[in-house]
Every structure is written in structure tokens, then in C-alpha cells.
Amino acid sequence: MNSGAGAGRWPSTAWAAFVAGRPALVLPHPNDPGALPADGWHPQSPAGHWDRPDTTWAAVLAADALRITLHGRPWFEHGRGPSWPGQEWQRAARTRGSILLVTGPFDGHHDFPTATATAAHALLLLVVPLTGAAGP
């Protein structure tokens, strides 16, 4: 399983944010291209895939972690810590019933705005349905 705590192949720098007004988990692109499953990821485009959650994925926002599964198997877990989603993000995710995963050619917070502005076509998006929620 990939983890916000640094285990697996995803960097430990994943963070919660709002992207285009949607609750999102921003994941810097892994150095290992094999770490990114092909299932459901789409390039950012005007037509987009913003409102079509991919049901092969699922997210559960619990009091202690955000857990994401692919085909029912653990894929990512982001536990409480400095980048834990705030109350506003959690409410928005529960209200919308999904979260947006965003990855692309950036290493962290410092170069995400530049990557978004200059390489938007290189960003990959995935809408994951929120299948369960617990906590505030």
C-alpha cells in the first residue's frame, strides 16, 4: 500500500487541497512510473472527467486517516499529521461524495503552482467516490 507516511512508492509529500474548488489529494508524481496504476486516470482537459467518479476506486474518510482502495485492495493511506485535511475540506468531500486525486510533473508544494500553470496538460486527474465517512 502506498502511504502518506512515506511507505510504498509515493512520496511522503502528498497533501490535501482545493483544486478548482474541489476537495483534492495532491500527489507529486512518483519517480517510478509503475507506481501509477492506469485505472481511471485522465489528462486534464476542457471536457474533463470531473463529475464521473471511477467506481473501481473508493475512498473512506475516517477520524484518523483517509484510505483509498483500488479494486477493493488498499492503495493509499494518509494518516493524521501536518498535511491532514482541515474541517472545511472534510465537509466538502462528504458533501460532494468524492475527492479528486491530482498528480503530475511536480515534486511538492513549492513547484505545484508552476506545474499547474505551465503544464496543465500534463496533470492527471482521478475522481474517487467517497464510500464511507466517519468523524466530524
Image (tube, grey):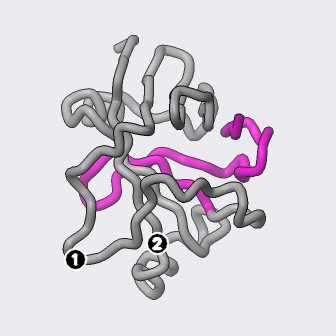
Residue to which mark 1 is pinned: 46
Quadrant, the N terminus: top right
Instruction: Name the residue at 25% across, 35% down.
Output: 92
Front residue of this view, candidates 85 and 122: 122
- Label 2 packing within 10 angstroms: few (<14), some (14-19), many (20+): some
**Magenta span of residues:** 1-28
Reply yes or no: does residue 2 show up in magenta.
yes
Could you tell me which quadrant the C terminus lies in?
A: top left
Q: Nearer the viewer, residue 101 or 65?
A: 101
37 or 128: which is nearer to us? 37
Q: Which mark is residue 128?
A: none
Q: Is residue 6 above or below residue 22?
A: above
**Element under label 2?**
loop
User: Label 2, on which residue?
Assistant: 123
Asked if 81 appears above or below 132 in the picture, the reply is below
95 with respect to 32 (left or right): left
| C-alpha span from label 1 to label 2 | 13 Å
Quarter of the rendering containing residue 90: top left
Residue with the most extreme bottom position = 118
